[in-house]
Image (spheres, helix red, strand yellow):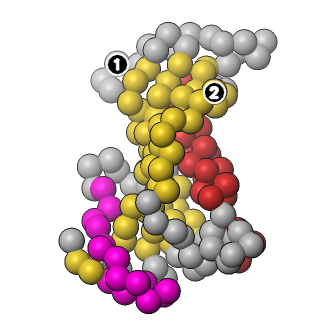
Amino acid sequence: MTEAQSTDGTIERAQAQPTDRGPPVIRTIAMPADTNPAGDIFGGWLMAQMDLAAGNVAARRARGRCATIAVDAITFHHPVFVGDEVSLYAWLVTVGRSSLRIQVEVWRRERASEATMKVTEATFTFVAIGDDRRPRPVPPEPAGH
């Protein structure tokens, strides 16, 4: 890890984004409209982005509609600032009969730097939903996966 001075003057340890999970599910830029009254990026905006990333993974694996039923152990390690590039990584942890647990990590990169750091993480639980809006079984994984 290397140290980097952030825009607020604090020294933070830079970390390397994960490379063993493929590309980010979502990559976006934190904008002024996403701030809380203190001017930092609102935690609720980060949670919404995490839910979108996890929902994308859940829907692809379940091959259809899924609903969020729980978010466990969300941890905010560092703030995100306006202009930061925000990368969200999400991957399956477990698949049950109708449920899927997905781990999500959020990483930030300051606009004018290559230094990155993990800022937030949580585990999301989804249930596969049928046309009747009731839980349905998650189909078996296709052969070769």
Q: Quadrant of residue 140?
A: top left
Q: Quadrant of residue 30?
A: bottom right
* Residue topped by disc 2: 69
**Residue 141: horizontal and vertical position, in percent?**
41, 19
Above or below residue 114? Residue 65 is above
Q: Read off the magenta span.
A: 4-18
73 sits to left or right of 143: right
Task: Report if residue 89 lies within the magenta region.
Answer: no
* Residue topped by disc 1: 143
Classed neighbour count for the residue bearing mark 1: other residues with Cα under 10 Å, few (<14), some (14–19), many (≥20): few
Numbered disc in front, either 1 or 2 = 2
137 sits to left or right of 1: right
What's the residue type where badge 2 is placed?
Answer: Ile
Q: Residue at x 71, y 69 (%)?
A: 36
Instruction: State whether the magenta stretch is mostly helix, strand or loop.
Output: loop
State which quarter of the image contains the C terminus: top left
Above or below residue 30? Residue 76 is above
What's the residue type where badge 1 is placed?
Answer: Ala
Q: Secondary structure at mark 1?
A: loop
**Residue 15: horizontal and vertical position, in percent?**
29, 67
